[in-house]
Amino acid sequence: MEIDYAKSPLPAIYQDVLGSHDAGSNQLNLIRPILNYLQIGISLNYMLASDERDDRMFTHISVLHDLRALEPLRKNLPDVYAAVAKQGFIADTGRYYLLDSINGYKNA
């Protein structure tokens, strides 16, 4: 699963970080292409055991982003890089942060 952030609104994590900075169009043009690299999409599907309707499935989708993709920001936008990196976590395969998520979607 891959999500293209080239033309869509920035994910909430970047909207929050850039809200405290005076972000110009050059900064946004630097961030947008970076978001499309080194993504990992995770989809979790489950059914509630206590639910009376057995046929309702819930789906949670999370997009993890490898912090290595943010290396260009380290030099050009160090404050943005630091704010995002603070929210990262370490896994066996590298260092990631939650880029985006859709939670609690019910499949019909």
Image (spheres, rainbow, N blue to C red):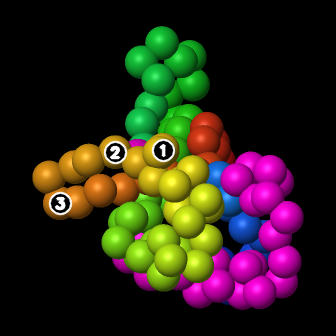
The answer to whether the residue labelled 2 contacts the one labelled 3, judged by CB atoms less than 8 Å apart, is no
The image shows residue 57, relative to residue 108, as above or below, that is above
What element does badge 3 sit on? loop
Mark 3, mark 1: which one is toward the viewer?
1
Q: Is residue 43 visible?
A: no
Q: Please give the label number shown on residue 89.
A: 2
In the displayed structure image, the side of residue 90 where residue 5 appears, left or right: right
Labels in figure, total? 3
Magenta stretch?
16-44
Amino acid found under the numbered disc labelled 1: Gln
- The x and y percentages for residue 102 are 61, 50
> Gap in Å between the C-alphas at discs 1 and 2?
7 Å
Q: Earlier in the sequence, mark 3 or mark 1?
A: 1
What element does badge 2 sit on? strand
The residue located at (64%, 85%) in the rendering is 30
The answer to whether the residue labelled 1 contacts the one labelled 2, judged by CB atoms less than 8 Å apart, is no
The answer to whether the residue labelled 3 contacts the one labelled 1, judged by CB atoms less than 8 Å apart, is no
The residue located at (63%, 78%) in the rendering is 31
Q: Is residue 25 magenta?
A: yes
Which residue occupies the extreme left position in the image? 92
Q: Please give the label number shown on residue 87.
A: 1
Q: Please give the label number shown on residue 93.
A: 3
The residue located at (74%, 50%) in the rendering is 16
Q: Is residue 108 magenta?
A: no
- Image quadrant where one finds the N terminus: bottom left
In the displayed structure image, the side of residue 98 where residue 83 appears, left or right: right
- The x and y percentages for residue 79 are 61, 59
> Gap in Å between the C-alphas at discs 2 and 3?
11 Å
Which residue occupies the extreme top position in the image? 50
The residue located at (29%, 56%) in the rendering is 95
Amino acid found under the numbered disc labelled 3: Thr
Q: Nearer the viewer, residue 106 or 56?
A: 106
